[in-house]
Each structure stands twice: as C-alpha cells, then as structure tokens.
Image (cartoon, coloured by chain):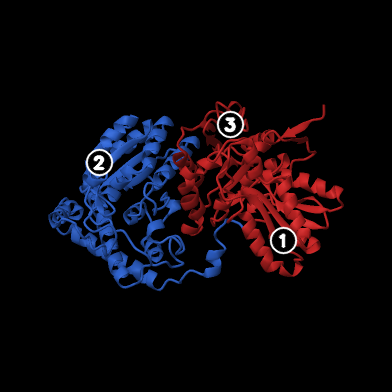
Amino acid sequence: MGKVSQHAALYRMVATIRQVEEALAALLAEGLIPGFIHLSIGQEAVAAGVMSVLTQADTITSTHRGHGHAIAKGMKLEAFFAELLARDSGACRGRGGSMHVADVANGMLGANGIVAAGIPIALGSAFAHKTLKRDAVAVAFFGDGAMAEGLLHECLNLAKLWDLPVLFVCENNGWGEFLPTEHQIVFTLDKLAAAFGVPHRTVDGNDVGAVAKVAGEVVAKVRKSGPMILECLTSRVGGHYEGDPQRGRDPAEQVAAKARDPLEIARARLAEGEADKIDRDVTGAIAAAIAFARVAPEPDWDVAAASVYTSAA
Amino acid sequence: MMAELRYNHAVNRAMADAMAADPTVVLFGEDVAGAGGVYGATRGLRDRFGAERVRDTPISEAAFVGLAVGAALSGLKPIVEISFIDFMTFAMDAMVNQAAKMRTMFGGQVSVPMVLRTQNGGGAGSGPQHSQCLEAWFAHVPGLKVVCPGDPASAYGLLRAAIADPDPVIVIEHKALYAMRVPEPEALPILPIGKAVIVRPGRDLTIVSYGGALRAVAETAATLSAEGIEAEIVDLRSIQPWDEAAVLNSLSHTHRLLIVHEAVEAFGVGAEIAARMADIGFDELDAPILRVGAPFMPSPIAKALERRYMPNTNSILAAVRRLLA
C-alpha cells in the first residue's frame, strides 16, 4: 500500500469509528439500545492503527469500550448495528450487545464486561497459535484501569514464561471508570513491564499514523520473539459511559482531552477534499447499516433459550 | 493377581486415551507435568505426549484458567487442573463470566470445548480451605456442566465424555477416592453426561447420592439390608444436567426419597432435587423428602469432629429411620 492510500485507509477507519459512535449516542438517546454503552471517542486511532497491521488470522480480545476494536478488526457495520440494537441479524444474534460484541471469524474474540478478563483469553489464543503452529499473534487490549488488576500481572508473567506471541495494548486514557488513574495506581506500565522482562514501547495514541508505524514494528517482533507491551497515550473525551454526568471532572482537563483530536490529526495528512469524500462514504455506509438494523427482527425466545449449550444435554 | 483399576489411574487413562486420539487435547495446571499431579492423576503424561502439550503452570489460577478459555476459542481442547476446588475462587471469572456465557453472548459463533478437572472433599483433616464441596456453585451457572465421578469406571467414562463435549465441563473428582480400586472392568465405555445409574436396586426407599458420599450410602444400605430394608441407590454421576427422569422413576416404585451429599446441606444440590421431586413427583411421595449433608459450618480438622461433620452411616441411618417411620 502506498503512503497516500495508507493515510487514507487509516483516516477512513478513524472516521468510521467516530461516526459509528456518534450514531450510537443518538440511537441510545432514541431508546433503541439496551443497557449502557461505553464510547471510545478520542481513542479511535489506537484501534485503527493497531488493527491496520494485523491479519485476519490474528486474534484480539477487547474491553467494555470495544466498538472500535470490533469494527477495525473487520466486523461488518450491518452486523454491528443490528447487534447493538439486540436484533437477531446481529453478529451475536442480539445476545451480546455493546459489551460482549464478538466476531470470531475475523479474530475478534469479544468485548468484555469484566475489566482485565480478556487478557488471559488473548494469552490462550496465542498459546493455541503457537501450539498449532499458526503464523498468528493475539492482541489483548486493556485500559490503564486494568493495571490495578492482579490478573494483568499474572498474565505478563505467564506470557513471558511460556514465550507466547501476544501483544498487550494498553489504551492509557488517564481514567479508570470514574476516577483518574493517578488516584488508583502508584506505578507506571514501563516499570511493570521491566519487572517481567517484557519489552515496552510508548506511542502517541491519538496519532493513527504513529500507532500504525510502531504497532507494525512491535507486532513483527511479537511474531518472532514473544510478548511485548504497547502503551498508547490517548484521551477519553466523554465519560465512563454514554450519559455519564462526569461530576467532578475538571473542565480544563476535559478541554485538554479534546485538544488533540485523532480525527483531525489523521485528516491533516490527506489532500484537500479527500477527507470530505471519505466522510461522505462513511456516513452513507453507516446510514445504510442503521436502516438495516432498525428493521431487523428481534431475537426469538425459543432459539435463545435452546442455545446455552452446543447440543441439548 | 487379578488386574485392578484405581480411580487415579482411570483419570490418567482417560486423559491419555483422549490425547492419543486427538492432537488438539492439551493439559496444564499446577504440578501436572513434572510432579504428575498432587494425587498422581497426570503422572507420565508429559513423557508420553511432550512438554508442548503437558505443561506446569505458575500458581496463577485466574490467568491459566482464563488462558484455557482462550485456547478453547482458538482450536485447542484444553484440560486444565485446579488441584483443590477451594482454589476456584481465584478462577471464578474465567469459568462463570467467560467460559459459561460465551456461547450465549456470541450468538452461537463459538463453543468453549474445555475441561476443568479438580477434586473436592473431606476425610483427610485438610480443613476449611482444602475440603470443600462446591459443586452447587457451578451447577447454578447456565452454560457449565458439572460431573462428580464416584468410582473408577465413572472417573474414566465421564472424563472422556467431558473432553469430547463441545461445552465447558467441570469434572470434580474426590480426594478420598483416588486410591479406590475395583477389578479391571471388561470395558470402559464413555459415559453420557446427564445420565444417572442405579448402583443398588431396592424397593423400600431411594437414596440419591454422588461422588464421595456414595461410600457411606453403600455401607448404610448393606446395614439396612441385614434388617430386611432394601434401599435403591441412584448415583447421579452428573450434577448439571442431572437425571431427573431416573430419580423420578426410582421414586415411583419406592415412594420415599433421601438425598445424601457431602456438600453443606443448605442451598445444596439436594435442595434442587427435593424441590423438583416435590413438584413433579408429589403424587408418588409417601413421606417428606429428606436430605443429609454437611452442617452449616466450615470443615473441621480434628478427626472426631470431621467424622461427625461428613455424612456417615449414623447420620444416614437416622434419616432413613425418619423416612420409614
């Protein structure tokens, strides 16, 4: 892929995730989405950049803030919106929704409602890649809030001990739920990585070009020589969940979070008019996917109730 | 000398046969490779199948059970061992929130073909953190299957079935049964999950039990037989799903039901069986359904106290007398 088309492709993905999530906020307000949703507005460049260097055979596990990961890994917009609206045509037949959206055929092993829980699942996927001699890596996305989970520490140890082809991607947005992580965590990820002998790189997580470049280098190393951590410094523009009143959030901090918009940074790399054209394409595709989802059938009770196990016991 | 089958050897043979038949079956857990397992159930498997497929893990239950879930999603059939069921507290998320729910949450895109082997039970003075029977916790979670083999042939047959099963299965062995020996069976079939077996026919009452408690139940039945009372013993083998039809069928000709398990009686497996039979078997009952389980306290370590704590011939006989009174 040439340089110009690579920038365009990255911009397209950042713009897609942004527009998808803005549309989700509207659909939530309309009452069409069950439960709550966690938006990644401000963090889109991490998903777009990392996924741009993965193959379809590579696998990922995601977080409660996982819409961008699912779409960047290749989930079709129709299947995505139908899932978020809990329809039978959704990727998970309307049984997963925002927090459990998955697209296994494309290597997306699930968003996850439990902080840090996806990390060992990525280890297991990497273990399977290695054992079955597949040329594939697994990527575990997690937020800086998960740094306080012991499970992350256990997984770093185990990944290094078994030399697994797994990349730990920390989306460091400075927040763990409703509290800045500086009030939760006394260490930094590079120091934690050093304790386990796992190489650590930091990248500007709001610059999709930078994420793609560094992720490309890091993933190549993981394929050859085992686990690494990529820490992406990014910004959570909104609250923990859509509709979070964000009481007590410093207005100046919120302004700063918006200041380096990944969409604008990606847009600045494109020729005049190119971004507008991509935006229009994306808007059209999203409108079509939402139109599909709005009229998609509701899940069937009997089918859902009979699907807990693979075969009737 | 007549050939014998030991419970822990049956467990070992089940894994060996499954690994020989299917190269995607792998085994890992604390001390399963080098040491061969706390109770010797995995001895020799690394030598036979290699260090790639049989691995020791660090003492990180949450991480390696979660790893098993991910491996199951990506083409392997992992058997993971938790050496004492009490340690499952650290691995609950992987089984309860992840493995159990993925098939539902992902709309049937995947199955999670993993087996979690562990063991439970008292009798060795191991105390409150190494003697618990926690099968009801897992039987309460939609998406999990739970089996409790109570003899060597069941240990083999149920573990083979668990490994072949596309869904997550928790196999709960019993620490006091590992040394149990029976004459080598002519055949060792794979046993269907969800099917109970009548281990002793009788006409006067039905005793439903499973796992380690079966021994005291069998002893009690022998004592009763000497008095002319014939107890029918139903070994559930599977806890989730459990064989409602077999229990109802037995109840339909004995009309009296006692449930015996080693787990704490309150909110246990017996409560579920009693509630179901009070519903669908109400017309068959000639007496209230009774249960014998552990009292509502942590397991004692002192021998005399633990003997009293666990179901035993005295407590089971007392319940039978009430049932027949």
Q: Position of residue A189 (x, y in %)?
A: 27, 38
Residue A181 relative to residue A90: left or right: left
Give the residue displayed 34% in from the left and 31% down from the top.
A196
Write down the quadrant of residue B27 in the picture.
top right
Residue beneath disc 1: B245
Chain under label 3? B
Chain under label 1? B
Colour of chain B in the image: red
How far, Cα to Cα, is label 3 from label 2?
48 Å
Residue B1 relative to residue A229: left or right: right
**Badge 1 and badge 3 both on one subunit:** yes
Closer-to-camera residue (A142/A286): A142
Give the residue displayed 32% in from the left and 43% down from the top.
A148
Q: Which numbered disc, 1 or 3, marks the residue that appears first in the sequence? A: 3
Q: Amino acid at mark 2?
A: Lys
Residue beneath disc 2: A213
Q: Which mark is residue A210?
A: none
- A89 is higher (above) or lower (below) than A231: below
